[in-house]
Image (cartoon, rainbow, N blue to C red):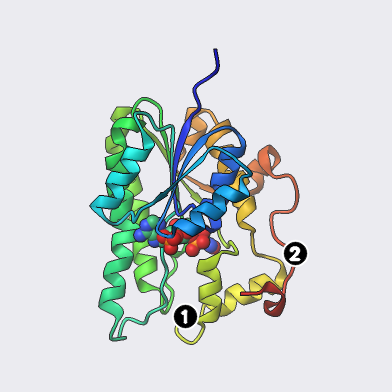
Amino acid sequence: MGTIARTAVITGAGSGIGRATALELAANGVHVIAVGRRLHALEETRDLSHGGPITCVSADVSTEDGRAAIVEAAGPSVDFLVHGAAISPACLIGDPGFRDSWNEVMRINLDSLMCVTLSLSDQLSGGGRVLFVGSNSASKPRRGGAAYCVSKAGGRMLYRCLKLELGDLGILMTTAIPSPVYTDIVKHHIKSQDVFPDGADYARQLAAGEMIAPETVGAFYRWLLLENSDTSYARDQWNINHSAHHKDWLKGPLCMPPMDLDMAGD
Ligand SMILES: NC(=O)c1ccc[n+]([C@@H]2O[C@H](COP(=O)([O-])OP(=O)(O)OC[C@H]3O[C@@H](n4cnc5c(N)ncnc54)[C@H](OP(=O)(O)O)[C@@H]3O)[C@@H](O)[C@H]2O)c1
């Protein structure tokens, strides 16, 4: 008799860290429910998996309809939930569009963490693992990044409160900080240095070979989700830059080779 495939819901699976994690889990036989708003990006993830067990669900995590579509696609049992969806528009607090931008960031980056987790809590109960993508921006204020920083700080506390209360259901949770990772969010910040001056730090890190590839984060998250004991997994916070665990999963260098922006493409 064959074993029943485990199921992972991964939001933000059409690019960056979410995509890399989806590919790693699918390569290890986990059925991935890949969630994002752009269907073509999700289909690209599925194509990259060369026929891996990936189901694409075009859904906005910040809407009730979107979350209903996720629950329907996930089925009766979910082993892993990875909260990869987020946006990080560069916008100064005094800008005319700031209020709208703030509201959108809070809906996607913060409210959806709670709503998606609660929507799937029955399916996750009895041993399911939830992974929150942490960020240094939770504790570092950034000019032009107020909404993102506040959403990440709020996400950190929300995770801790959910862990306290949903622990009773046997749902295991952790936060893992991956940064800095060369993804669309970072590319956008590098291009927006007039509004988001920390983008210059990201450009310098790219040139200095201090950026991490999303694929490396995918390998880290695969190890966290698939190969850790419950006690080890559910520690308060993991950080990819702490070297103590590298021997357990890292196959080569942590960071990408130095790259100049012209070579880096879009
Ligand atoms: N890159 C870094 O250095 C870094 C550092 C720390 C933490 N993080 C965190 O890592 C996570 C992944 O980000 P990333 O760096 O990989 O950037 P990314 O490539 O831009 O990924 C974000 C993904 O979220 C999806 N998304 C955005 N809004 C959504 C919504 N309303 N519903 C469903 N999906 C939505 C996007 O797809 P659609 O637009 O198609 O929906 C996109 O695929 C985020 O939580 C980010 O805060 C990144």
Residue designated by label 2: 257
Labelled disc at residue 74: none
Kind of residue at disc 2: Pro
| Image point (32%, 57%), residue name | 110
Spatial CA distance of label 1 from label 2 is 25 Å
Kind of residue at disc 1: Phe
Q: Position of residue 137 (x, y in %)?
A: 45, 64
| Image point (40%, 33%), residue name | 78
Which residue ends up furthest to the top in the rendered image?
1
Is residue 197 shown to the viewer in this render?
yes
| Image point (32%, 40%), residue name | 71
Question: In the structure shown, which secondary structural element does the residue marked by tag 2 occupy?
Answer: loop
Q: Position of residue 220 (x, y in %)?
A: 60, 45
Please, is residue 218 above or below residue 30 in the view?
below
Question: In the structure shown, which secondary structural element does the residue marked by tag 1 occupy?
Answer: loop
Using the image as rendered, state which of residue 40 and residue 211 is in the foreground. Answer: 40
Total number of numbered labels? 2
Residue designated by label 1: 196
Q: Position of residue 8 (x, y in %)?
A: 46, 38
Q: Position of residue 174 (x, y in %)?
A: 44, 42
Relative horizontal placement of residue 2, taking residue 137 as reference (left or right): right
Quadrant position of the N terminus in the picture: top right
